[in-house]
Image: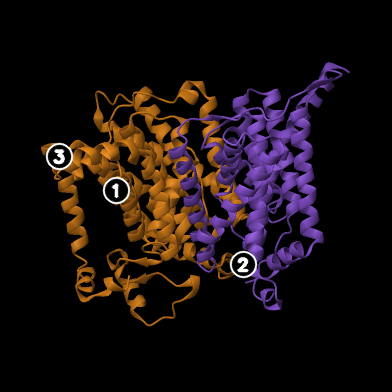
Amino acid sequence: MSEGIVYWLQQALNALQLGSIYALIALGYTMVYGILTMINFAHGDVFMIGAFFCFLAAVYLGLPFVPTLLLTMLGAALVGVMIERLAYKPLRHAPRVSAIITALGIGIFLENFTLALAPYPKNIPPLLENVTWDLGGVSLSSLQVIIIFLSLGLMFVLDYVVHRTPVGIAMRAISWDKTFVPLMGVPLDLIISVTFAIGAGLAGAAGTMYGLAYPVIDPYMGIMVGWKAFISAVVGGIGNIRGAMIGAFILGGVEIMVTAFFPSTYRDFVAFTLLLLLIVVRPYGILGQPRTQKV
Amino acid sequence: MKTMRNAGWEWLMAQRWLLPVLIAVGFVLAFAIPEYNLLNKYVQLVMMYVGINIILTVSLNLVNGYMGEFSLAHAGFMAVGAYTAALLTQKVLPVAAYPGLFPLAVLAGGLMAALLGLIVAVPSFKVRGDYLAIITLAFLMIVKSVIENIDYIGGPRGIPGIKRLTTLPWVFFWTVVSIWVVRNFVYSKYGRGVLSIREDEIASDLMSVNTRRVKFLAFMVSSFFAGIAGALFAHLLQFISPRVFDIIKTTDVLIMVYLGGIASIAGSIIGATVYTVLLELLRPSTVAAMLGWLPAVVFDPLNEYFIRHLGVWRMVIMPLALVLVMIFAPRGIMGLREFRWFIPRRDLDAHRRPTVHGGSHGAARSH
């Protein structure tokens, strides 16, 4: 293969890896938005909590990869449900911005609470034996394969749950109408909690994978990654689950390609400029439906 | 806040002549305090931060509270103002010889930020709500990224050694100006337009509100004062870098806006003051100073405990307090209400008439 193609393939692989991590987090943003029309700004910090759970499970419990992943997802899901019950549920009928500010507050709380308990960045031990294959010049690590396929697997499971199971049908029904659907016997509070649990669980999984791919974790790691994932959700059309996945891979691709061809300091500049242009051209995201506004 | 509706408060708020008197007294104090060292340097510093935060909060409240948008770009405008002013005082204006040129630099910072505010206003014609939030966030990130990539202005290292030109009178002056301008803007014809955009943009468009011009003006005024605050901030902190003006700075201002309450000048003043002062009060050294009256047997171990633990935990306590305030008072301390001092006389009569309040669309109430 010519050198150019090899380079492109290599970068495409990196983009897939980054994009799948963004996608797992973006799903949580978009699901919560779909149901509550609320931006859960603490979600990026749930991702960070996930990475720290992974650290705890791997170092203090000495667990191998699969139990660590499951435990992390479970722990993150619990944190997500607790945040919903304690901080967001009392505000369900308050103005929308109060919930947003509460979410920002919870995010700052999670960051600094973690900082208070873990003042120095932590190293996640390599949980998996990392084998690197050479495919005609393109190097492919087993870690990359696992991250990409595990994320894709989780996304397919989620897509199935949302579109084919009773819980998913209830979730979509509630995102359609919050007044009359509960009257037909759909348990509103339970479904909202399940949504938060799924979203936070996926963020936990993303935290584990991020920790394996980039092993140094710190309490502020969730801010930037969280905002990027949020942008992915918006690019895809917020509230739309398949859109969030597409948006995440687009953003991951753009970031990696910018870093590959320009100085890495231009990454955010180009990524955000593209985002701006996209929103101006298509204000409802790629898969989002423009809603008619009535007066 | 029913308790505030007592007769004494009513009487106090009816004494409209008190406001100019308070401003005059404030000016005298602003000059006197640093001149005669009436308060120690640390308290003076906190006072200046409070003033800068009030400017930031009042100006962000114009877009986020009165107009009902969700802008995240405030730290970006602040950065533009700070960098413009700092470059002027460092490289262009001979401020060492003529300290009187400092206000020019501050003004230039504000104007530069206002110019960029115009650019952010353009997408807001088409896009609203969460998507506008993303656009403003993107703007903030782009500003930060551009600054990081220009080596002439220090790149990611920032500008060190800025002269400390911000003084208490200047902060007080700009605080008063920002409150006065925003208040007059909100109660002007355009201010009505701003409020109508919050309630229903399409309807206000149909009622012949020039929504584009209103948005231009609102974003310009808001970003102008963000730039002013940034310029003052730079010449107080004496060091700026792109990292100072990241999303966390915006979050701080957002918290002050919503803690104090949207669409309220009094709320912005209270929110900024409470948040800034509380954060300072929770500093270990402040707590130690406040506990200084305790006997040494109790004080020493307590002091040691606070110094070791409070530094980190204060940023844990603060957001929790914020969440509690939001749960028990979702509109913030003064949400949609106003001190009667800030409401022009002709509007007071309108407020006195019995009107239907309720839902999220209640008009600004006086008390």
Mark-to-mark CA distance, 2 and 1? 38 Å
User: Could you confirm whether marks 2 and 1 are on the same chain?
Assistant: no
User: Could you confirm whether marks 1 and 3 are on the same chain?
Assistant: yes
Residue at which label 2 appears: A189
Amino acid type for the residue under numbered disc 2: Asp
Which is more toward the observer, A241 or A234?
A241
- The residue positioned farthest toward the right in the image shown: A1
* Chain A, chosen colour in render: purple
Residue at which label 1 appears: B277
Q: Position of residue A289 (x, y in %)?
A: 74, 59
- The mark found on residue B296 in the picture is 3
Is disc 3 surrounded by few (<14), some (14 to 19) or many (20+) residues within 10 Å? few
- In this picture, residue B31 sits left or right of residue B100: left
Q: Earlier in the sequence, mark 1 or mark 3?
A: 1
Tell us which disc is closer to us: 1 or 3.
3
Amino acid type for the residue under numbered disc 1: Val
The kind of secondary structure element at disc 3 is helix
Q: Position of residue A101 (x, y in %)?
A: 48, 55
Q: Chain of mark 3?
A: B
